[in-house]
Amino acid sequence: MGPANKSQTSPDTFLLMGIPGLEHLHVWIGIPFCSMYVVAVVGNMTILAVVRTERSLHKPMFLFLCLLSITDLVLSTSTLPRMLCLFWLRAQDIAFDACLTQMFFIHSFTAMESGFFLSMAIDRYMAICHPLRHTTILTHTRIAQMGASVVLRGVVFFSPHPVLLRQLPYCRTRIITHTYCEFMAVVKLACVDTGPTKHYSLSVASVIGSCDGLFIVVSYVLILRAVFRLPSREASLKALGTCGSHVCVILVFYSTAVFTFLTHRFGHNVAPQIHIFIANIYLLVPPFLNPIVYGIRTKKIRDHVLSSLMVKVA
């Protein structure tokens, strides 16, 4: 009885199913996913290397960008390699502890991503609306404090996730209908009432996402108001172009996050293929887009990368 109860309470492995109904396309789906992962890794590593070597880029905007790049690298690396093993090698087994670890990294670093988007919005607000006080307010110490608070928030609020799931008995099935260990996909496998556990997860995600989203919207509204008051049309267009690209990335992140949240809460009739595909976009596209939008479209980083390439070619 002892071993049986233990296996029910804590299974050795789970089986990742992938995208149900599209198993025959897993090999082909893995190709664009792998391409996005390569771009995400190369792009974010390039941003980190450029900012580290170029002292003129040791400014608030680029320091926040580095924090975002580190978050993107951890977030994409915690999901993509394992997902590609599932798609290409049909490696469905994932150890129970590895599943809980992946879940913690996904949810905590997603919260950090949201926090760093807010930090960057605050930085743009200070740079455009209060340019004379920008660097005096956002000092390196203040940036470190903001970064530490974002990391601490993600760790504190999402550390209970693996702890809560470890306490649950699993006696229904070991098959996770997903491409990675998502909290809601795993908690469905428990054979007890998981209402309080689900409510905690959804409440934390909704509070963090809605608060960050609200402050980001307020920041960009104030930015737009200041931009339209600029005397130079050229300066206004430049600021609008920069802010517009930033807003596009933020919209992709939050729109897919809101869709995933609402699907868990209300969308019981949403096809699982759609839900899982959007959940993958939610994790994969922002790390892929961030180095393109924040890196390539940032003149100082682009010029430094181009000059480095020209030196190497010469």
Image (cartoon, helix red, strand yellow):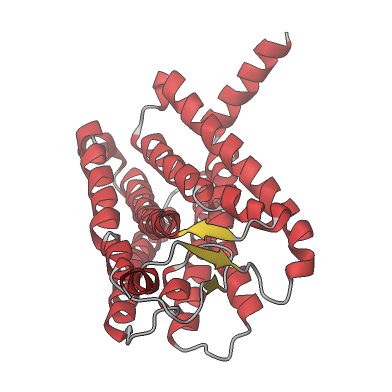
Height in image: 134 above or below 254?
Answer: above
Locate residue 199, reporting x and y percent: 30, 81
Q: Quadrant of residue 224?
A: bottom left
Q: Is residue 186 visible?
A: yes
Locate residue 86, reporting x and y percent: 65, 57
Of all residues, the one furthest to the bottom in this rendering is 269
Locate residue 314, reporting x and y percent: 73, 8
Of all residues, the one furthest to the top in this rendering is 314
Height in image: 191 above or below 98?
Answer: below
Q: Residue at x 67, y 53 (%)?
A: 33
Q: Is residue 138 visible?
A: no
**Residue 15 appears left or right of 254:** right
The answer to which of 15 and 195 lies nearer the viewer is 15
Q: Residue at x 57, y 46 (%)?
A: 293
Task: Pick the quarter of the image with the N terminus.
Answer: bottom left
What is the number of callouts on the image? 0
Locate residue 40, reporting x and y percent: 59, 43
**Residue 113 appears left or right of 293:** left
Q: Residue at x 39, y 79 (%)?
A: 190
Q: Residue at x 47, y 50 (%)?
A: 75
Height in image: 159 above or below 46?
Answer: below
**Residue 314 appears left or right of 234:** right
The answer to which of 23 and 209 lies nearer the viewer is 23
